[in-house]
Amino acid sequence: MLIKYILYPLIGILLIFVGVIVAKKNNLLKNKRLILFFLLCLILLCVPSLLGLLDYDFMPFGYISSALIYFIFGLIALPVVKWVKKSEPGFLFEIILLSLLLFVGMIAYGFMFNIFNELDYGFWASTSLILFVLPSLFKKTFLSFLGIPAEIHKVWDYTKSEKFEGHDYIDYNKLQVIQLELFKKQSDSGPITINAKAPEDIPFGMWFKQVLMDYNLKSPTEPIVYQTGNSDEGWIFYVKESFFKSRNYIDYEKTFKDNKIGEKYKIVAKRVELFKIDQQ
């Protein structure tokens, strides 16, 4: 009884009081969007507590439904936090705001759940709110993972690369269309995408040189600038990352087959300066 009617509200009031002090110290109370967002979120986070009316049927159907609802709320909250901050929010601001909402929401959820459900396990039921902050944590983890620099061993040099002149061991019956993304010049605002055929048994560097030569032959007025005369300049290649696969760097001395490159992958060719790689 003490926990149900006194302790939960006191903890909730204490958390709100601490949040107000922090917000006042950082001049956040002047942000009307923030106040509106916080109040609306608290109301929405309390709504699923009505599932406590299911009584004994709350487990597992009500709990799973609550968790899914809060996960969706968390996904919606990410762009809304950006609107609240009026700029791209840092992760610290985002996670503190969502965590404060999480803890206050859990207390309010547990208190209201115990009113609607005679089993009095509102605290355990409120753990379904944890999924509210999961999208934010996943986004941060995923972006941090993509930001991990991969180890680079080799830099391709146009002048040192062997020219393709046809080889008997290459099977031309197994051609695949490869998407290649690159900037024609370093000063270009955006990359171009080239679709080129490649046998799986050709070394990647040899194939890339042939692609450059063929493209410049067809477009002499707007060629790809593959070298600016700087001896410390070269190219690196990697499979463009996506939600399901990470960035994998390509060994230009190996074949498409050895690099495990297929038609479903987009390859990025990027100019680099050797001294910048050494500094990393």
Image (spheres, rainbow, N blue to C red):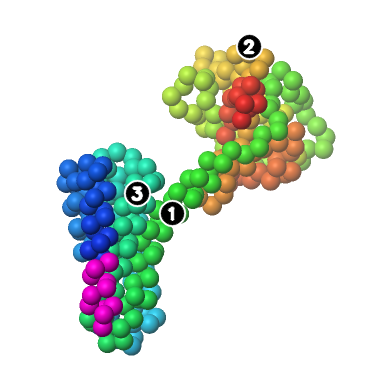
Q: Is residue 186 magenta?
A: no
User: From this viewpoint, which residue is outermost toward the top?
Assistant: 229
Sequence order check: which comes first, mark 2 or mark 1? 1
Q: Which numbered disc flags the more N-terminal residue, 2 or 3?
A: 3
> Does 197 appear above or below 214?
below
Within 10 angstroms of label 1, few (less than 14), some, or many (20 or more) residues? Answer: some
Q: Give the label, 2 or 1, closer to the camera.
A: 1
* Residue at disc 3, secondary structure: helix
x, y (%) of residue 93?
34, 46
> Disc 2 versus disc 1: distance between alpha carbons?
45 Å
**Is 184 on the left-hand or right-hand side of 55?**
right
Left or right: where does residue 71 sit relative to residue 230? left
For the residues marked 2 and 3, what is the alpha-carbon distance in whole angstroms? 46 Å
Q: Quadrant of the N terminus?
A: bottom left
Q: Main secondary structure of the magenta part?
A: helix
- Compared to residue 165, the image places residue 4 above or below, namely below
- Name the residue nearer the viewer: 160 or 136: 136
Q: Nearer the viewer, mark 2 or mark 3?
A: 3
Q: Is residue 10 magenta?
A: yes
Which mark is drawn over residue 94? 3
Q: Position of residue 36 (x, y in %)?
A: 18, 52
The answer to whether residue 217 shows anywhere in this view is: no
Residue shown at 53% from the left, 46% from the top: 145
Amino acid, disc 3: Glu
- Is residue 271 visible in the rendered structure shown here? yes
| Three-letter code, disc 1 | Leu
Label 2: which residue? 229
Q: Nearer the viewer, residue 121 or 75?
A: 121
Residue at 37% x, 76% y is 124
Q: Which mark is residue 137?
A: 1
Instruction: Give the spatial CA distance, label 1 vs label 3.
Output: 10 Å
The magenta span reads 1-11
